[in-house]
Image (cartoon, rainbow, N blue to C red):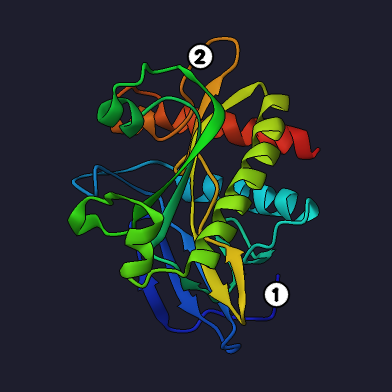
């Protein structure tokens, strides 16, 4: 384990806590077992979720780093804690979609399961109070969330990340339906931050179509813990 120790709590979100360290450029991200949905209006606890999401996120960040994608990961410290570069998070959530599901179906009348070729990349304002509304590039620029060059950069990176992850998850017999990304600025660079886990990705079993992600919690499908553990089992098996 790294010699760097946790300092004061910097921020606590719905799924993670972020702690300062003795190095002003590094923070520790601790994964919680708490689960929320619908802008935090639905809440519960999923046993060992933090351990699962930390492990999967570390594996995914390492995969992306090996493919040339710069992330905030420094190292996995233990079951629940990850040492990361401190980011100035851009308040733009990036969603990449390969298969129609979720809000795309509700907003635009797509049929769930419809293949999206080419994939769709969308931007949302990161603001629970406003229910994370869909925004376009001009909205983001006028709200001073990012410059046009930055938006073009994160859109391009999202497409690259999507291709890498889609191919990877297929080797685990999983369809990558859609997923959320967050980016932040660090010393003049834009890095991928946050996490990549069943909390932020929709994953469907290739053979059965079973949903192995947060939708099991959102829509009371049952066996939430089992679904998360199944994804971890496949990721760990692949690493081995």
Classify residue 157 as left or right of residue 179.
Answer: right
> From the viewer's perspective, is residue 109 above or below residue 176?
above
- Write the residue at 71% across / 51% down: 64
**Residue 136 x %, y %:** 36, 52
> Which quadrant is home to the C terminus?
top right
Q: Nearer the viewer, residue 103 or 4?
A: 103
> Which quadrant is home to the N terminus?
bottom right
Inter-mark Cα distance, 1 to 2 = 40 Å
Residue that carries the numbered disc 1 in the rendered image = 2
Q: Nearer the viewer, residue 57 or 96?
A: 96
> From the viewer's perspective, is residue 204 above or below residue 225?
above
* Residue 219 showing in the rendered view: no
> From the viewer's perspective, is residue 70 above or below residue 42?
below
Q: Which mark is residue 24?
A: none
Q: For numbered disc 1, what is the local secondary structure? A: loop
Residue that carries the numbered disc 2 in the rendered image = 209
**Residue 171 x %, y %:** 73, 26
Classify residue 190 as left or right of residue 97.
Answer: right
**Residue 39 x %, y %:** 24, 49
């Amino acid at each position: 384990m790294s010699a760097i120790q946790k300092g004061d709590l910097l921020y606590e979100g719905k799924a993670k806590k972020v702690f300062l360290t003795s190095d002003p450029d590094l923070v520790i991200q601790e994964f919680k077992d708490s689960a929320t949905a619908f802008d935090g209006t639905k809440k519960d606890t999923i046993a060992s979720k933090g351990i699962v999401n930390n492990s999967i996120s570390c594996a995914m960040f390492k995969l992306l780093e090996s493919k040339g994608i710069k992330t905030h990961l420094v190292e996995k410290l233990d079951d629940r804690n990850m040492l990361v570069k401190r980011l100035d998070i851009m308040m733009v959530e990036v969603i990449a979609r390969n298969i129609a599901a979720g809000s795309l179906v509700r907003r635009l009348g797509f049929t769930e399961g419809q293949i999206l070729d080419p994939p769709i990349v969308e931007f949302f304002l990161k603001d629970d109070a406003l229910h994370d509304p869909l925004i376009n590039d001009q909205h983001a620029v006028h709200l001073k969330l990012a410059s046009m060059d930055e938006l073009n950069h994160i859109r391009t990176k999202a497409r690259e990340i999507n291709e890498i992850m889609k191919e990877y998850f297929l080797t685990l017999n999983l369809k990558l339906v859609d997923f959320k990304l967050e980016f932040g600025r660090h010393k003049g660079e834009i890095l991928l931050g946050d996490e990549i886990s069943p909390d932020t990705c929709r994953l469907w079993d290739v053979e059965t179509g079973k949903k192995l992600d947060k939708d099991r919690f959102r829509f009371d499908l049952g066996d939430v813990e089992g679904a998360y553990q199944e994804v971890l089992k496949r990721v760990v098996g692949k690493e081995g």
